[in-house]
């Protein structure tokens, strides 16, 4: 990870931190911060289902698979693919075979 930061700070592949490179990095940082503060619901969507809900709805045992399914659900919510509890259950039904 350190090498990536060094690459970023030093201007990418050229190794030269020019004014244009710095302005580009600052613009990227501004856009990321703006998205984070202006759209927190996308960054941290509301919890539609928890592990207990998944175990009950899909007759699953406690374990890592529950976490994988919850991560997939949060990603789908952040992408705007899932907005309700019902959609969450439908989406996870399609993911069950892929996480077995």
Image (cartoon, grey):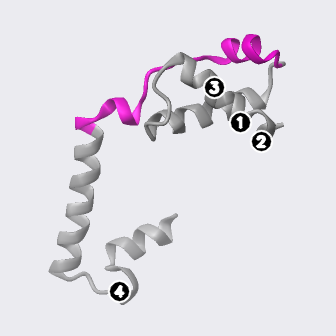
- Answer whether labels 2 and 4 touch (C-beta < 8 Å): no
Q: Residue at x 17, y 70 (%)?
A: 23
Crowding at dot 3, Cα within 10 Å, few <14 / some 14-19 / many 20+, comes out as few
- Answer whether labels 1 and 2 touch (C-beta < 8 Å): yes
* Drawn side of residue 42 relative to residue 18, left or right: right
Crowding at dot 1, Cα within 10 Å, few <14 / some 14-19 / many 20+, comes out as some
Q: Residue at x 82, y 19 (%)?
A: 60
Question: Viewer-proximal residue, 23 or 86?
Answer: 86
Badge 4 is on which residue? Answer: 15
**Looking at the image, is mark 3 or mark 4 earlier in the sequence?**
4
Point out the frontmost of discs 2 and 4: 2
Badge 1 is on which residue? Answer: 95
Q: Residue at x 42, y 67 (%)?
A: 5
Quick check: is 23 in the magenta stretch?
no
Label 2 to label 3, Cα distance in Å?
Answer: 14 Å
Q: Residue 82: x, y in percent?
A: 50, 30
**Looking at the image, is mark 3 or mark 1 earlier in the sequence?**
3
Q: Residue at x 49, y 72 (%)?
A: 3
Point out the frontmost of discs 3 and 1: 3
Quick check: is 48 in the magenta stretch?
yes
Indicate the secondary structure of the residue bearing disc 1. helix
Above or below, 23 against 29 in this view is below
Badge 2 is on which residue? Answer: 98
Above or below, 66 against 81 in this view is above
* Drawn side of residue 21 relative to residue 82, left or right: left
Label 2 to label 4, Cα distance in Å?
Answer: 42 Å
Point out the frontmost of discs 3 and 4: 3
Indicate the secondary structure of the residue bearing disc 3. helix
Badge 3 is on which residue? Answer: 90
Label 3 to label 1, Cα distance in Å?
Answer: 9 Å
Magenta residues (range) = 37-60
């Amino acid at each position: 990870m350190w090498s990536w930061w060094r690459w970023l700070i030093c201007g990418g592949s050229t190794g030269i931190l020019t004014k244009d490179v710095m302005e580009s990095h600052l613009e990227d940082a501004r856009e990321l911060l703006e998205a984070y503060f202006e759209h927190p619901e996308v960054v941290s969507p509301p919890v539609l289902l928890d592990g207990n809900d998944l175990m009950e709805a899909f007759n699953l045992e406690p374990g890592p698979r529950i976490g994988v399914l919850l991560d997939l659900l949060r990603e789908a919510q952040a992408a705007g693919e899932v907005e309700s509890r019902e959609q969450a259950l439908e989406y996870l039904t399609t993911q069950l075979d892929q996480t077995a």
